[in-house]
Image (tube, rainbow, N blue to C red):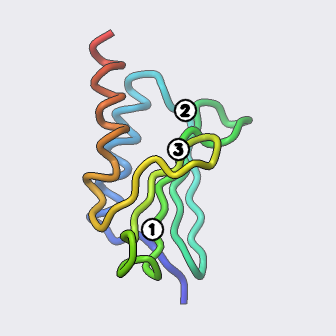
Amino acid sequence: MQIGFDRAELTRILDLYGRMVAAGHWRDYAMDLGRDAAVFSAFRRATERPEIRIEKRPAQRNRQGQWALIGEAGMVLKRGHELAPVLAPVERRLMKLVAE
C-alpha cells in the first residue's frame, strides 16, 4: 500500500510552501509517495538538497507521532502527532523573513 497526504494535509503544506515562495525563500518542491512514508521536500534551488522535508510515517503513529520535520543535514527538527505543531518552526521562520 502507498502512503499519501490527505486533502487537508496537502492544503496545509502547499499553503506554507506558497507563502515561502512569495517571501522569495523557496523555489521548488518534490513529493515522494512510498510504501513507508509520504515525503514533501522544499528546495531553495532545484540543484541542492532540500532545505526541509516533511515526512508522514503512519507506522510511527503510536510512538513519537507520524509527522516529522527534517532539516537540510538530515536531523529531525520536530516530531509530533499533529501536522500544525510540526510545521511551527517553519511558520516562525516565515514570520522573520516577512518582518525583514
Q: Which mark is residue 56?
A: 1
How packed is label 3: few (under 14 Cα within 10 Å), some, or many (20 or more)?
Answer: many
Quadrant containing the C terminus is top left
* Residue 6, image quadrant: bottom left
The amino acid type of the residue labelled 1 equals: Lys
Query: How far apart in space, not on screen, are marks 2 and 1 (Cα)?
Result: 22 Å
Determine crowd level at label 2: few under 14, some 14-19, many 20+ residues with C-alpha closer than 10 A.
some
Residue 98: horizontal and vertical position, in percent? 30, 18
Disc 3 vs disc 2: which is toward the camera?
3
Estimate the x, y position of residue 39 in percent, counting from the top left. Answer: 53, 62
Say which amino acid is labelled 2. Answer: Arg
Please give the residue where the numbered disc 3 appears in the rendered image: 52
Which residue in the structure is indicated by mark 2?
27
* Label 3 vs 2, first from the N-terminus: 2
Residue at 43% x, 31% y: name it.
Answer: 21
Q: Secondary structure at mark 2?
A: loop
Residue 80 image position (x, y, % from top left): 33, 62
Does 92 sit above or below residue 49?
Answer: above
Mark 3 secondary-structure assignment: strand
Evaluate if marks 2 and 1 touch, with contact meaning CB atoms under 8 Å apart.
Answer: no
- Residue that extends furthest to the front in the rendered view of this protein: 63
- Residue 33 rendering spot, x and y as whole percentages: 56, 71
Residue type, label 3: Ile
Secondary structure at numbered mark 1:
strand
As measured in the structure, the alpha-carbon distance from the residue carrying label 3 to the one carrying label 1 is: 13 Å
76 w.r.t. 38: above or below: above
Give the residue at x 54% y 43%: 71
Residue furthest to the top: 100
Badge 1 crowding class, 10 Å Cα cut-off, few under 14, some 14 to 19, many 20 or more, is many
Tell me if 31 is positioned left or right of 61 in this view.
right
Name the N-terminal-most of marks 2 and 1. 2
